[in-house]
Amino acid sequence: MHELVLRGLDVAEMPGIARWATSPHWSHHPLGWLPLSLSVFEEEPGLPSYHARGGSWSIPYGRSDDGPQTAPDRTAEVPPAAETTTGSASGAIAAAVSNWAEESNGRIEARTFELSAPVRAPVVPSVLASLELESLRGLTSSDLAAVSSCPAAQAWRLVFAAASTGGAYNHGLRGAYGRLAAWRSLAGLSGAAVHASAAEVEHQVLECDWYSFGAATKWFERVAWDIGLAAVAPGRRQMAVLAATDTD
């Protein structure tokens, strides 16, 4: 059913399917948490295409310097940050890329931080550099990460592709469960409550400021599978980071 949702079918308007999907029998199924229609940030999911000789799909991971970058304000004061990462938060943030580490050669960094003052876009590159991230280890204050502001839809495309199609040596979770993992990652990055509904997660995701980042550090493989995402929650004093890399 959720494969149909990903392909634009409005199953909520089909009484037979809707009654079946929302029946008590399926109330505890993991996919039952997902909405029966695409969110505004899901837009048109990148799905694989199949043909007589095999299949193919696009990889939405561009170079870290692609797109309009956030110009860093090197004169602004960088607010101190305290790490707040918990096991549950890290697991949620990493959900979309966990298959990279479990079934391929991937590395993952998933962390959360509390900032002492609100942070705005021009300071984000300097804040990331100050967090002592493993993925950015080796950068100097004069060699900041390439950071670009991005819409929630772009963040979702990245995590959905990572979850659904997998890394260098695996095939991922496919569409339906890939969608669930992508939602879980966005929920963790946005700071949504652990037991939040899909509607509450969607609202929180749309309220966040999203950034993609990358850097020529030894941590990133820079082959084809690199992700750097940072989310600044409403109030601009909580930041969550997801970095992932894989190689063949």
Image (cartoon, grey):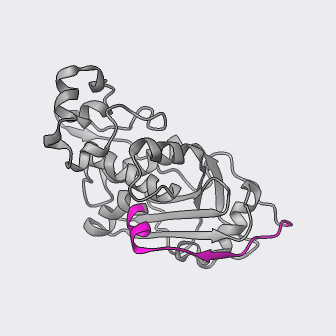
Q: Residue at x 37, y 56 (%)?
A: 96
200, above or below 236, in the image: above
201, above or below 53, in the image: below
Left/right of residue 1 with respect to residue 210 in the rendered view: left
State the image coordinates of residue 89 (x, y, percent, origin top left). 44, 67
Q: Quadrant of the N terminus?
A: top left
Q: Residue at x 31, y 33 (%)?
A: 36
Q: Which one is nearer the viewer's eye here, 246 or 4?
A: 4
State the image coordinates of residue 169 (x, y, percent, origin top left). 27, 61
What is the magenta range? 75-92
Residue occupying the far right of the picture? 75
State the image coordinates of residue 82 (x, y, percent, origin top left). 62, 77
Any magenta on residue 196? no
Left/right of residue 176 with respect to residue 110 in the rendered view: left
State the image coordinates of residue 170 (x, y, percent, origin top left). 25, 58
174, above or below 96, in the image: above
217, above or below 202, in the image: below
Q: Residue at x 17, y 22 (%)?
A: 16
**Residue 174 visible within the image:** no
